[in-house]
Amino acid sequence: MEKSSVLTVLSALAHDTRLDVFRLLVRAGPEGMTAGSLAATLDIRSNTLSNNLVILSAAGLVRSAREGRAIRYFARMEQMRDLLGFLMEDCCGGQPELCQPVLDQITCPC
């Protein structure tokens, strides 16, 4: 992962609502959540949610799929895995293989 991409992802998560949305989608797992469910669960307006989902999508943290008139959102765990891999690249005194088990646990068919 390039440094500029890392900064984009971290910037997207550095907002209260966006962090809540991403964490909620992580909890939802492979089923994801519709925009309406996200807005209701987080008690935020649809247009506010929409703006935040655009930013999370641009950062590669969420993906969407249309279901009739609804849009379902999913956390992109591979992007989070890439971010953590970048952050842990030089961990453990230059022995990143020691951190690999942590990264291997971040798998989700989301």
Image: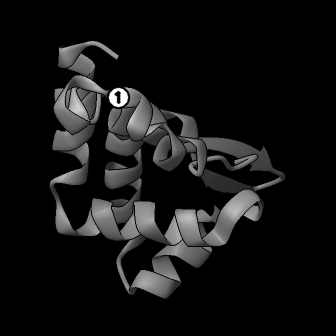
- What colouring style does the render use? one colour
Residue positioned 43% across, 67% down in the render? 23
User: From where the camera sits, is residue 9 visible?
Assistant: yes
The residue nearer to you, when weighing 8 against 49, is 8
Question: Could you tell me which quadrant the N terminus lies in?
Answer: top left
Measuring from the top left, give residue 42's x and y in whole percent.
Answer: 41, 82
The answer to whether 88 is drawn above or below residue 44 in the figure is above
| Residue most extreme to the right | 68
Measuring from the top left, give residue 28's x and y in whole percent.
Answer: 64, 70
Q: Residue 5 sits in which quadrant?
A: top left
The residue nearer to you, when weighing 65 against 3, is 3
Q: Residue 84 sits in which quadrant?
A: top left
Residue positioned 17% across, 31% down in the render? 93
Image side of residue 70 versus residue 18, left or right: right
The answer to whether 103 is drawn above or below residue 51 in the figure is above
The answer to whether 57 is drawn above or below residue 69 in the figure is above
Residue positioned 55% across, 64% down in the render? 25
Image side of residue 109 versus residue 95, left or right: right
Measuring from the top left, give residue 66's x and y in whole percent.
Answer: 75, 45
Measuring from the top left, give residue 38's x and y in whole percent.
Answer: 52, 73
* Pointer 1 local density, CA inside 10 Å: few below 14, some 14–19, many at least 20: some
Q: Which residue is mark 1?
A: 96
Of helix, strand and loop, which one carries label 1? Answer: helix
Q: Residue 33 sits in which quadrant?
A: bottom right
Image side of residue 95 versus residue 69, left or right: left
Number of numbered labels in the structure image: 1
Residue positioned 35% across, 79% down in the render? 44
User: From where the camera sits, is residue 59 visible?
Assistant: no
- Type of residue at label 1? Pro
